[in-house]
Every structure is written in structure tokens, then in C-alpha cells.
Image (cartoon, helix red, strand yellow):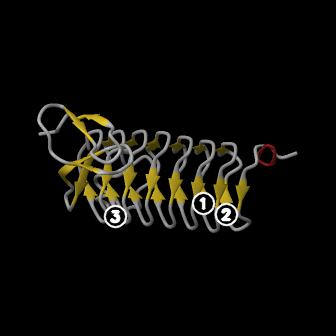
Amino acid sequence: MDTRQRLNVRIHPTAVVSEQAIIGEGTAIWQHTQVREGARIGAHCVIGKCVYIGADLVIGDNCKIENHASLHEGAELADGVFIGPHVVLTNDKLPRAINPDGSLKSSDDWIMGHIRVEHGASLGASSVILPDVTIGRFAMVGAGSVVTRDVPAHALVVGNPARLVGYVCSTGHRLPPQEGETWRCPICGEEVSIHSRD
């Protein structure tokens, strides 16, 4: 019996999933999605339709990746990450199709960048994350934002380039500004440690 059947993995017949990919128990992969070789997807994830998951990419448990997201090689998602529709995780700061002599670039002609999305973070629809960036725990990236630098834990960033506009609790409620480094959510009561960036 196929290991994926034993693990209750659901893969739509139109999805292209490499036999060298590792798919965790209870994960669902929807139509027209591609999962490349060496990718490791955790347990109980939902991967929407027309998603691209690059080679050797790592996705933790309980992640949700919405339709048409493109997650390129060099990215790593911790547990509980939300990726909105049409989000792009890039991996090349100097993208070119050709070398200066006009020859087509190969895999040896560039340096892959890396992206780390920490536990519980959310990337809003159509946001773009540039290489060599870390998105902190429970941070929230607004829809359509372009992230060019690290985002602190619990930060809310928006715009192009994305800028810090506030902080959110782990359930996503915006925190009103407060004195000190510990802020309390007036809705859920969670206390959040705030460490702002420059």
C-alpha cells in the first residue's frame, strides 16, 4: 500500500507531486498543484489549487496555503503558517534570464536566497516576500505588501516596501499602542512581548 494512503493524504488527480516529496499525515493537496522533489510538507496542511512548491522546500504542520501561491526553493515555513492567495516567496535578488555574454543562465549562475516564515505568521493575499528575510512569530503581512526586510514577531506590516504600522496578538487582533514592552490585547486578553525594529 502507498505510504500516502496509509497516512490519509489526499492528493487531487491533477496535482503533480514528486515521488521524492514527503507529505505528512492528513495533508490535502488540491488540483493543478505542483510539489517538487525533496519538498517536505508537514501533517494536516491544506495546499490549495494551482500552488507551486519548490524543490527541497520545508513546510511545517497545520499550515494553510491558498490558491495560486508560489513558494520557491529556499523557503522554510514553521508550523501554523498562513499563506494567502497569490502570495510569492522569491529566491533571487538579481534575477536575469541570461549571463552578460547572452548565454542562458543555469543553476550554477546564481546564488539562492532564503526566506523563513516563523510559527503562526500570516502573509496576506498577493504579498511578495523578497529573499533573505525572516517573518517573525505571529507577524501579519498585509495584502499586496512587498517585504524587503525582516519582520519582528507580532508585527503588522503593510505597503511597498512594507513598513511597520502596529502589532497583533496571536489571534490577529490589532493591539492598541501601550507603554512598555508587554502589550495586552483588549479582545482576547493575551499579553504580547513587543520588540520593535528600527
Do labels 1 and 3 touch, CB within 8 Å? no
Q: Is residue 130 visible?
A: no
Residue sitting at x 42%, y 43%: 120
Q: In terms of depth relative to the viewer, which is nearer, 17 or 179?
A: 179
Q: In terms of depth relative to the viewer, which is nearer, 190 or 26?
A: 190
Residue type, mark 2 in image: Ala
Measuring from the top left, give residue 175's x and y in whole percent.
23, 47
Numbered mark located on residue 102 in the image = 3
Do labels 2 and 1 touch, CB within 8 Å? yes
Q: Which residue is mark 1?
A: 34
| 149 sits left or right of 77 in the view | left
Residue type, mark 3 in image: Gly
Measuring from the top left, give residue 113's x and y in whole percent.
35, 44
Q: Is residue 107 visible?
A: yes
* Above/below status of 151 relative to 92: above
| 100 sits left or right of 3 in the view | left
Q: In terms of depth relative to the viewer, which is nearer, 168 or 6?
A: 168
The CA span between labels 3 and 2 is 35 Å
